[in-house]
Amino acid sequence: MSARVVCFGELLLRLSAPGREKLLQSPQLEVRVGGAEANVGVSLARFGHRVDMVSTVADNALGEAVVGELRRHGVGTSAVRHVPGRMGLYFLAPGAIHRPAEVLYDRAGSAFALAAEEAYDWPALLAGADWLHLSGITPALGANTAAAALAAARAARAAGVKVSFDGNFRPKLWEAWEGDARAILRGLMAEADVLFADHRDMGVVLGGQYAQAEPLQRVEAAAADAFAAFPHLQWLACTLRSPRNVDHHALAGVLVGRSSGTALAPQEEVGPIVDRIGGGDAFAAGVLHGLARGWEPERTIRFGLAAGCLKHSVPGDFNLVSEADVEALVGEGRYDVKR
Amino acid sequence: MSARVVCFGELLLRLSAPGREKLLQSPQLEVRVGGAEANVGVSLARFGHRVDMVSTVADNALGEAVVGELRRHGVGTSAVRHVPGRMGLYFLAPGAIHRPAEVLYDRAGSAFALAAEEAYDWPALLAGADWLHLSGITPALGANTAAAALAAARAARAAGVKVSFDGNFRPKLWEAWEGDARAILRGLMAEADVLFADHRDMGVVLGGQYAQAEPLQRVEAAAADAFAAFPHLQWLACTLRSPRNVDHHALAGVLVGRSSGTALAPQEEVGPIVDRIGGGDAFAAGVLHGLARGWEPERTIRFGLAAGCLKHSVPGDFNLVSEADVEALVGEGRYDVKR
Amino acid sequence: MSARVVCFGELLLRLSAPGREKLLQSPQLEVRVGGAEANVGVSLARFGHRVDMVSTVADNALGEAVVGELRRHGVGTSAVRHVPGRMGLYFLAPGAIHRPAEVLYDRAGSAFALAAEEAYDWPALLAGADWLHLSGITPALGANTAAAALAAARAARAAGVKVSFDGNFRPKLWEAWEGDARAILRGLMAEADVLFADHRDMGVVLGGQYAQAEPLQRVEAAAADAFAAFPHLQWLACTLRSPRNVDHHALAGVLVGRSSGTALAPQEEVGPIVDRIGGGDAFAAGVLHGLARGWEPERTIRFGLAAGCLKHSVPGDFNLVSEADVEALVGEGRYDVKR
Amino acid sequence: MSARVVCFGELLLRLSAPGREKLLQSPQLEVRVGGAEANVGVSLARFGHRVDMVSTVADNALGEAVVGELRRHGVGTSAVRHVPGRMGLYFLAPGAIHRPAEVLYDRAGSAFALAAEEAYDWPALLAGADWLHLSGITPALGANTAAAALAAARAARAAGVKVSFDGNFRPKLWEAWEGDARAILRGLMAEADVLFADHRDMGVVLGGQYAQAEPLQRVEAAAADAFAAFPHLQWLACTLRSPRNVDHHALAGVLVGRSSGTALAPQEEVGPIVDRIGGGDAFAAGVLHGLARGWEPERTIRFGLAAGCLKHSVPGDFNLVSEADVEALVGEGRYDVKR
Amino acid sequence: MSARVVCFGELLLRLSAPGREKLLQSPQLEVRVGGAEANVGVSLARFGHRVDMVSTVADNALGEAVVGELRRHGVGTSAVRHVPGRMGLYFLAPGAIHRPAEVLYDRAGSAFALAAEEAYDWPALLAGADWLHLSGITPALGANTAAAALAAARAARAAGVKVSFDGNFRPKLWEAWEGDARAILRGLMAEADVLFADHRDMGVVLGGQYAQAEPLQRVEAAAADAFAAFPHLQWLACTLRSPRNVDHHALAGVLVGRSSGTALAPQEEVGPIVDRIGGGDAFAAGVLHGLARGWEPERTIRFGLAAGCLKHSVPGDFNLVSEADVEALVGEGRYDVKR
Amino acid sequence: MSARVVCFGELLLRLSAPGREKLLQSPQLEVRVGGAEANVGVSLARFGHRVDMVSTVADNALGEAVVGELRRHGVGTSAVRHVPGRMGLYFLAPGAIHRPAEVLYDRAGSAFALAAEEAYDWPALLAGADWLHLSGITPALGANTAAAALAAARAARAAGVKVSFDGNFRPKLWEAWEGDARAILRGLMAEADVLFADHRDMGVVLGGQYAQAEPLQRVEAAAADAFAAFPHLQWLACTLRSPRNVDHHALAGVLVGRSSGTALAPQEEVGPIVDRIGGGDAFAAGVLHGLARGWEPERTIRFGLAAGCLKHSVPGDFNLVSEADVEALVGEGRYDVKR
């Protein structure tokens, strides 16, 4: 049973150093397409859902390329606006061993960031949809996008479209325009049915302190606060990430239901990492897939974690794996050549 | 003391995704040359033996390239036939972490698969040879190649040329033409002096069940059955492979002699893997090298395992290492720069 | 407080196989610039010191490229001589898992090796400098460079410029011209304030045997002998390297002061290694930075080890990290993306 | 005024040597997607028409990549069938100066070639379409595809959908299965409203001899025969190509209307050629665009020729230019940087 | 006799499609460093002058790379300011045959454009200089840079530093902020000793109409107006460019002296063009070199044109040729291999 | 009728800048294998002759790669000696338009140059051969190779093996060791049956002045002197090369027979050139092929020129074309895609 999903957010070009080089150590950049919400959208399209992207891009060769790449991966792009302006970019040096990856954002003043709230006709854009997916990056980009994200979430609730919201708290973006992160994020979370967030996000929004010894306890306490604060909220999910070094992390997954309690996907060792970007988005897509399919929480969180782990083996921001690929890993994992 | 070895089998072009990408994720393919028997041949040529390839390729630029690559690595190619037709291909996405490598064969209808049994004049081709090396892939390609492989093995035995046979059981290939794998493989194994096979191969051919707790016990039981069934057989060898994840396997080696019992090369950790393809062929070549040199079983299997391990560090299907490289690893291993 | 540092040594072009390939397995070579002393110089320039290179290169496009690359990384090159001749080269195959990296030197007869002692006007070249850095590779190249290195060290001492000397004992280079390594190195070490050397170097130069059970004990014993033999010497530092396999080493750091005793930086696991070349030079630069800054030995050796570890994550011979990058690792290490 | 166009034909992967190398001279292949009818489809989509591809691909990563690439360029792919089998491939060495480009087809037994006539439900596939575009390559692939092409053309005529047919006579393909090229092509041309063909094609199909001195006269005579033989036919168009050497051709364009006579686009010099493949398809798409727009013959053939010329400057099989790009060249051509 | 030259202008990263591809046709970008004034500076440094760049870059890895690249080519960078912000970028698709190259600027809001006039202490920056080189791009970027350029030119004149000004009129940049191009450019030209401009530039600034039949006559008429309007002006130079197609242009050079009349360098055919960007800057540097050397106008303009022609054979924005390279072409040109 | 040919000369690694870049403009080098005599050998092997290379290479990975590349292209390498030492290298920047290609030799002190005359047992090496091919580069490398070349030529004449000698006069190499070019080349030419040389070579060796107006007249006069001076000489051949610019040359071919007079292959335009290196060697191989086949002079020189022209379209030093490829060009040339 596949769902119709609308994703709203910025589309970005990623320009990354080849191999494990530093930025511009040699005179080449590899280009990928990304964006937190688009990453979720591509995953869901690969899992068999019908996904449409709502966004604004520059009406030039870069915007065309970004949109074409989404289409290539099965995401509908007829609701992407092409307007004069610039594309958001980010530069990436992937890091290695003890040297962390570095992201250099160059997205200020992008066509997406400058698009007015009224640019989007939400009732029309959401017609027939089952889900709307948003993240906390969009409102962090400025007053325009904050207003647009809120309008989208409220229109979805009004239309009976379920809202999925990924916290993705980025202090630097909020500071750049002195946005009231707490109020705006709270407004968005209030409309959410599903929230991807951990105790740090909830601390920012609800002001709670989560000093429990175990990460899982901190997440569960934060989830309890979230359910209390947001009556529409049904599910809160997050990963627990433990980096051993830059090339090797460990990941567990948690899904807390308002009524069903905590489902846990046990920790997996993930390394040597091919590409860590988009790991959280791949996890979110996996969880949304389980929820859309109506699976049990246990199955859902195991699928979500497996999807998130697999992303670390795929170059680029998109998790180019199928439902069957994820199921194979949930099953037992086969680590030898498939012929 | 170097041997003259004839290898018979298909030559393949491998087209692989760069880095750890998925197939056609970016629009480039890296080209390598391979084929189970050619892989063994190249290893043996590197170890100092005189090796000649018997095969059939397309009489076009691809066939020419494949043959040139063998020649580059010291394998004689004057017995390779060039005929109208197509080359066998395979596409490879190498995988990473939890995402297994995928091989996509495109070899149906190749010039090799279509070559009639009579295309090869075995008495002439084997004149002066010490060894003939075959694998279970060749008969799996169809009735023509099954007949040709049997003819080769029988001609070898008739001429006093020792026969090495690598089981390489591939159910999908047999199913494609409904070949009688059991009968044909049994016929080939009946001519073999050396057999590269484990309990799974022997279960297919002899019908035995090997439910022992330890892998080594299963191999030894299968070897006992093999020696009973095939009176010419002197040696059975295999690796015991334990994948921890896609980038990291562990390998041990077993060599069972009809009269000398079991020699074991203890497990080595192998990772991060550069290229897993051809690992079994590199092991087989290492063992054949020891047998051709007349080494003790213990030394032979240690050399075979070291050769197999080293292959995992070399890009491509061929194990581009020398006898001295393998000996250095058997010795103690030096893991810092050689200057 | 930044220092003025003069580095004297050969500049080399490194030509390396792409990825983990063997040399010329595919028809491409990646080009980097290196040289033990230049590697130290680039690190120190990145840490904020004013560094000038003294060397001799070929007056052709290769020499120009090498010098331009130093300049790009902030090292002064006005004291590099351009003369007719050839550039020193080295070819590198990086190795993997059990297959060690291989360096193929092609530096005989280089413009640097042939430059006469008198080519360098040391009093002028050292005017205003705080430090002179040399290594044992330069005297190993032949009688000319041995004389030049000694002249440099003695001129430095005469001018009150501190001398840093990295042992870098390379038997093959000495054997090629039957140079008296022991006498010449002893002469150089006699001028040194700081010596990068371990018990093996000191064994060569002072003839001692260091059979202590623990590597640290062997280094401390060698340091004691060095302080006894060389009255100017204030510090001896080295790494303790334990290769697990080609892709994974462990490194600790030792700094012994004539009066302050031993400071130890505890062992770090380093892997999967991106580029091992220049690891020792990066360590030396880190230690020199601490000494130039006047830091405590403990802080100095921790900084030196962290710098050396980080080098293993950077492609090429140069350690393209900043003081802040190293401090971040000394601090606690963050192994997730920096955004 | 944009049209709805259905294109039917095989989708191919092109694997080409980098730069001007010979095939496998170095171990890399660049991958492009093509196919005569898909090339026309991508052009028309870029010119603003709604285009849907009807085809059959292998249900593997290669088929998925091909279909994704069409989607990326704006062609609808929901009518592409994914079935077990292999993809058609072709290998390309681009040639240079006096060395002609070489195409090595490897398309026998492809999923498309093996698809039965009944696989396509033409009334449904053509519903709402204005145009159907076919070429002579499809029927040349075998009895299945010949039947399917005829069925498509007849269904189009029955449904009032205009038929565009590009002769693309390839003797080798017809000989491979001893197909009756003359009868089958005649059957297809009988349904065409627009025919891309020159005197050589018409000679094959109608048996005429065209020995006029001037190429244009030969085309006009052939067009007269075509209009006589095929009462539905309204337009015949072709290029007149004069290769000076492999890197430099000259091209003129001819469009003959049943009632309007000959419109000529004068010869353009085209060189140095970047990629000659798909030049004819780009021309056909340009002419179809003019016809769909209802332009005068003169304007139509000038647009067609300009589109065909521009293709020679774009790497790959697709003509990645917009209507505005072509109009700019028709206008006057600006050959300096656009900033 | 070498001069001390100060160049003031923006440093840009150029991101270009590989080969003759369209932007993002394949997922790679080649990176070069450029900027009209930096291009002149690198040429002059290569010709033996001492050149210092004055500019403002982002204090990140991109800014560091740009500055390092200038240093690599011998330009002094100690006067480049590193401040928070973004780097100016431009994307380039090189074009071919009839398809013009396209430049996509993404430089709005760059650190350079936002730097206030007061950021530069011109008396200090110009101390000891012989020449200041500016171009019309800098004032076109906004009020800040317009003010800074004027301040620089006036400070130079006040300090007796000769001013070289390249018109480089870019209407789009002026329109973006509604700057008064005419007044500002007039103010800058009033300070110039040497002006690189043709009749179009002078038409913009002085309002003249130049309808003479021959381009040379138009330039001479414009020069006469310029000498009348700007009493400090001694020289006006420009190229006459005739594009045959995108890959092949023809270039002549004109130098008009206030007192010496017109010197002409006759037209050269230039093709197939490797990289057209920076051709005008290379010409300007060549002319400035002749003026700085005190050469005759005839020799100067021939050198300038030869330098400009050579640039078309060098990838990237910089003209990486020496004085000897240019002299060789002025001499007679040798078009076979130099061994 | 194929011949057995022995080629004697140095094998070189060529390291070239990618595309049209300057050396080390970006940090990559493309690797090719070459050497004047090996280039001839590979061509002849491609034309169907049995060719064996006699040479000396370094016993390292570079020497192994060079020898493997020859074998790949069908040249026998069992007579290549592997000894300690270094490989000869050359660096190439290909040039463009007005910027000539530059070759930077780094071959001094190579294993080949240092090999003593006695290293080669000529009677054994020439047993069964029909032809020996040498060039003037070998004696220019030093006294050892000069002696070895003379010994080879004399042994060939003594054994009835025909001698082909390509003048290839390189003044710089002779000057480096003050070799007596005139005497040594005269000694070699005295043994030649076929001489590839023009009036410049003959002027050096015989001291003649050739001031005729037409190049062809100069060559004929030089040939007359050569036939007078060298009684064994039967044929003299050369190309007449007219460079229009670096990317475009014109070539004619001349073959003068002692008894048959002059045969001329008329001038061909050659451009845009892909790789000019090895053009002369390809011509020589084409002429030798015609002579070995016993063709008429006219056919021989047309084949030789066509082979030489085709080389300019093939990347690398080797002329990777077949006899059929050359015949196709001699025939009439087809400049459109071969499908």
Image: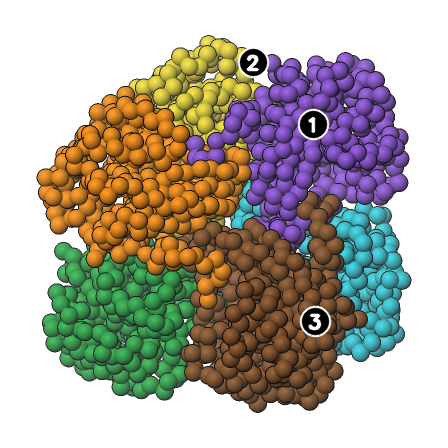
Chain colours: A orange, B brown, C purple, D green, E yellow, F cyan
Q: Amino acid at mark 2?
A: Gly
Please, what secondary structure does the residue beneath circle 2 have?
loop
Left or right: where D90 falls relative to F178: left
Q: Amino acid at mark 1?
A: Val
Give the number of the disc on residue E69. none
Badge 3 crowding class, 10 Å Cα cut-off, few under 14, some 14 to 19, many 20 or more, is few
Asked if E135 appears above or below E187 in the picture, the reply is below
Asked if B182 appears above or below C144 in the picture, the reply is below
Mark 2 vs mark 1: give the one in front.
Answer: 1
Give the number of the disc on residue B261. 3
Which residue position is annotated with label 1?
C254
Residue B267 visible within the image: yes
Q: Where residue A25 sits: x, y (%)?
A: 53, 37
Judging depth in this view, the residue of B176 and D2 nearest the camera is B176
Q: CA distance from mark 2 to mark 1?
A: 50 Å
Please, what secondary structure does the residue beneath circle 3 have?
strand
Labels 2 and 1 share a subunit: no
Quadrant location of residue C183? top right
Question: Count of labels shown?
Answer: 3
The residue at 71%/83% (across/down) is B161
Disc 3 chain ID: B
Q: CA distance from mark 3 to mark 2?
A: 89 Å
Please, what secondary structure does the residue beneath circle 1 have?
strand
Disc 1 chain ID: C
Quadrant location of residue C304? top right
The residue at 49%/21% (across/down) is E80
Q: Where residue B139 sits: x, y (%)?
A: 53, 81
Rendered-image quadrant of the C terminus of chain B: top right
Judging depth in this view, the residue of D235 and C262 nearest the camera is C262
Which residue position is annotated with label 2?
E128
Q: Where residue D27 sits: x, y (%)?
A: 54, 60
